[in-house]
Amino acid sequence: STQSTGWLADNGHGFLREPPEMSDPNDLDATMARFAANTSAISGKSSKRPADACTALSPHSALSLVDQAVAEAKASYADERMKDVPLSEELVSERCRILKVALERFQEAGPNLVKKTELIMLGRGKTLLNFNYGKWTEQQNTNVINELMFDADGCCDIEAVCLAYCHRVPRDKYGFDLVVSEFTSISQRSYRMYQNLREQKLKHIYRKQLKRLDSSVTAVVIDHCVIDDVMNEALQSMIMTEDLFETHFRPWLNQLSSEGVAEKEFVDVGNRVLPLDAKSFFHFATIFQTAAKELEKDGKYSHGQHMTTDHTLTGPRGPKRGGCAGSCSQDKCAIA
């Protein structure tokens, strides 16, 4: 009846009005039953009368909707009652551990750090994933971010991040698991976007800088000596220190083919060897680009006339050093 279900029987659109007073405010079973009845009626809103709503659905689909509605209502009810209950130390530790795993693919800031721009994504699951579970909103996410302290680079310690989210995400296991699943999907998508950005940067260097310096511009690969010359230019122009070269660039060069270097090889090895955090990666990429541009401006360097003329090195590949005159045809060591 209209009196018992709280429906407006004449509008035919499944809208709810204020439910009648409950004899017992803590009667959860009665609340769940009424909520399930209302949800079933909404699903059959094409019917002209609320009484026909559930009959418009098959018994299986109606039961599925009821089960889902009851589960979500129970979770929300439990979360509402638990939000002011303090979490035990053991539960806080466990929830933080789970959240840390969910956010581990946020890697732009480097080890044990998360960027503010990455955390903002957690409130935009609907946009990034084309779905969300309705358990975490953009406003809730903004409230957590506003509580955190970020450094000058917009980064925050991941332990502090997990602790902040631990106390704000749903308290019940059902809601918590849904939010963690959503966070995991968002962080994985962020990682793929970041990896694609790194690859595009390295492809740009290969196509726009290195190919211009290689004499065989139509070739599928470039001569390894072109890369050696770029490193020589970076050291000679003091764009890069030797320590920096030994730490980051030599491992990159040593893993490239000794003869021709294909674009995919250049990109894959560079992406794997160079630092994972965005700040360091783009700094080193800029060093490489700047050195290549300087070398291109040098009138002594022309297509096919490489500065490093002897490439039969007995040691690791890379630019020549002071004291290596025996294997270098240049009159004066540029590095020295």
Image (cartoon, grey):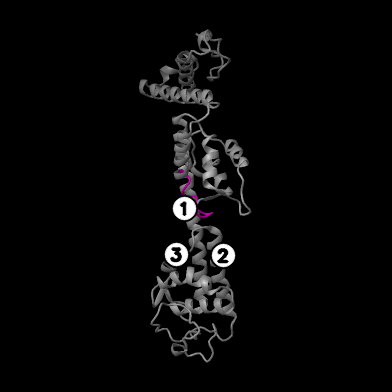
Return the residue at label 2: 283
Mark 1: amino acid: Arg
Relative height, residue 11 to residue 215 (above, below): above
Residue 52: x, y in percent?
45, 15
Q: Is residue 183 magenta?
A: no
Label drawn at residue 62:
none
User: Of helix, strand and loop, which one carries label 1?
Assistant: helix
Q: Position of residue 331 (x, y in %)?
A: 52, 92
Mark 2 to mark 1 CA distance (whole Å): 20 Å
- Which numbered disc, 2 or 1, marks the residue closer to the eye? 2
Q: What residue range appears in magenta?
A: 102-111
Packing grade of label 3 (10 A; few <14, some 14-19, many >=20) is: some
**Amino acid at dot 3:** Val
The answer to whether residue 74 is above or below residue 111 is above
Q: Amino acid at mark 2?
A: His
| Predominant secondary structure, magenta span | loop
- Mark 3–mark 1 distance (CA, rounded to whole Å): 17 Å
Residue found at x 48% / y 57%: 196
Labels 3 and 2: the sequence-earlier one:
3
What residue is disc 3 on?
Answer: 273
Tag 3 and tag 1, C-beta contact below 8 Å: no
The residue that label 1 is drawn on is 192
Coordinates of residue 177 in the picture (x, y in percent): 44, 35
User: Is 103 inside the magenta-drawn segment?
Assistant: yes
Of callouts 3 and 1, the N-terminal one: 1
Q: Earlier in the sequence, mark 2 or mark 1?
A: 1
Q: CA distance from mark 3 to mark 2?
A: 14 Å
Q: Tell which residue pokes out farthest to the front in this image.
A: 89
* Number of marks in picture: 3
